[in-house]
Image (spheres, rainbow, N blue to C red):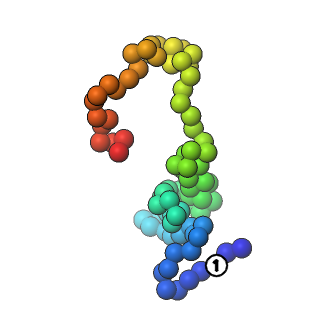
Amino acid sequence: MASSTRNGDANDGEIRLWQEDGWWIAKDVDTGVTTQGESREEALDNLDDAVAVHTGKRGREPTDEELRALGIDPENNTTGDQEPPDVLD
């Protein structure tokens, strides 16, 4: 079921969808996660994926075996006391 408000107040579970510069933009108001797509369907599919990652329902830490397969030694795979790059904030 869909609903709309004219006063701009957010509702629980609200998604906003609009067109901008030829792209469809989809935003999950609760999480603030925003995605885009060439079609409405693509923007909403991308939003589903992004919200799942944001909420921890998708994605996981790599296993030691997966790291080794990529040539990474799990024992040396730490940031130590270094701050992560700004892009990861």
- Determine whether, in the image, residue 52 is placed left or right of residue 85: right
The one of 21 and 2 positioned closer to us in this rendering: 2
- Determine whether, in the image, residue 79 is placed left or right of residue 6: left
The residue pinned by badge 1 equals 3
Q: Residue 1 placed where, x, y %?
A: 71, 73
Location of residue 85 (image quadrant):
top left
How many discs appear? 1
Q: Residue furthest right?
A: 1
- Determine whether, in the image, residue 30 is placed left or right of residue 89: right
Residue 26 seen in this snapshot? no
Residue at the image position 53 percent from the left and 69 percent from the top:
16
Image quarter of the C terminus: top left
The one of 37 and 87 positioned closer to us in this rendering: 87
Look at the numbered disc 1 and give the secondary structure of its residue.
loop
Location of residue 20 (image quadrant):
bottom left
Residue 87 seen in this snapshot? yes
Above or below — where is 63 with respect to 50? above
Residue at the image position 28 percent from the left and 30 percent from the top:
82
Above or below — where is 50 with respect to 28? above
Crowd band around label 1 with a 10 angstrom C-alpha radius: few (<14), some (14–19), many (20+): few
Q: Residue 32 placed where, x, y %?
A: 47, 60
Residue at the image position 51 percent from the left and 19 percent from the top:
67
Q: What type is the residue that disc 1 sits on? A: Ser
